[in-house]
Image (cartoon, rainbow, N blue to C red):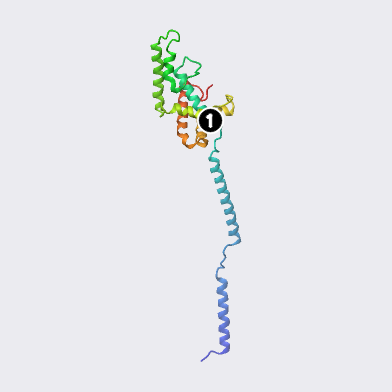
């Protein structure tokens, strides 16, 4: 038998109230509450700020490219040539006509009396020993007597040398006598095919500067 209309209405009303009560008791689902959204924005801004600061810090850690005149390459090569000549021929002040390529001939020339033609064999032996000993020392830095003198000559002819000497206590003078500055300059602006030998020439110049206790660029 079918339930009476009154019972059916009462049942429907009770069911409706139960459904309504259940729907109210269920937690309301939100994609994001206003408080959470605000904190999300704050954390996002904070994260972006931290990342920007970190990026800026990392960029600050990378030094700017070293810039200087390419003539410094020629000056480095010239200074090494000069230091080697000054070491071998320490009694001489002027080196007009002297090159690293003609050192053996110049040893014979300066040890021979210009009028009598008599050879001072002791002096000749002394100069020869200074030259061979120095070449042996520089060879430890991979300097090659047959290769690097013409290389230095090429660099000097290609780039020239400094036209003006920087003041000893100027920032420029300090930089030009800083091995790290010169090394970075070579790495930054020298042609790649020349870098290896230019760095070797610089290493040899540093060695000579320590040996004669003078600045890298000495005039």
x and y percent of residue 96 in the render? 50, 18
Near mark 1 (Cα within 10 A), the count class, few <14, some 14-19 or many ≥20, is some
Q: Where, by quadrant of the figure, is residue 104 drawn?
A: top left
> Looking at this view, is 171 or 126 the one in front?
126
> Looking at this view, is 46 or 123 the one in front?
123
Left or right: 120, with 57 as reference point:
left
Q: Residue at x 45, y 32 (%)?
A: 197
Residue linked to disc 1: 159
**Residue 70 seen:** yes
**Residue 73 seen:** no
Give the total number of marks visible in the rendering. 1
Looking at the image, residue 89 lies above or below residue 142: above
Left or right: 39, with 133 as reference point:
right
x and y percent of residue 211 in the render? 45, 22
At numbered mark 1, what does the secondary structure look like: helix, strand or loop?
Answer: helix
Looking at the image, residue 11 lies above or below residue 179: below
> Looking at this view, is 173 or 160 the one in front?
160
x and y percent of residue 177 in the render? 53, 27
């Amino acid at each position: 038998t079918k339930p009476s209309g009154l019972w059916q209405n009462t049942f429907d009303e009770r069911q409706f109230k139960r459904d309504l009560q259940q729907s109210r008791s269920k937690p309301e689902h939100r994609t994001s509450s206003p408080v959470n959204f605000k904190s999300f924005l704050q954390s996002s801004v904070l994260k972006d700020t931290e990342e920007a600061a970190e990026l800026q810090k990392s960029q600050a850690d990378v030094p700017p490219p070293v810039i200087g005149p390419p003539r410094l390459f020629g000056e480095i090569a010239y200074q090494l040539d000069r230091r080697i000549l000054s070491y071998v021929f320490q009694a001489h002040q002027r080196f007009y006509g002297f090159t690293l390529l003609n050192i053996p001939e110049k040893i014979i020339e300066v040890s021979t009396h210009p009028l009598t033609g008599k050879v001072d064999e002791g002096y000749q032996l002394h100069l020869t020993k200074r030259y061979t000993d120095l070449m042996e020392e520089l060879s430890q830095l991979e300097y090659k007597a047959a290769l690097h003198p013409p290389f230095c000559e090429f660099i000097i002819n290609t780039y020239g040398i400094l036209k003006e000497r920087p003041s000893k206590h100027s920032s420029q003078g300090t930089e030009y006598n800083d091995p790290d500055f010169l090394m970075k300059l070579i790495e930054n602006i020298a042609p790649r095919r020349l870098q290896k030998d230019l760095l070797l020439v610089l290493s040899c110049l540093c060695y000579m500067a320590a040996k004669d206790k003078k600045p890298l660029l000495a005039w």
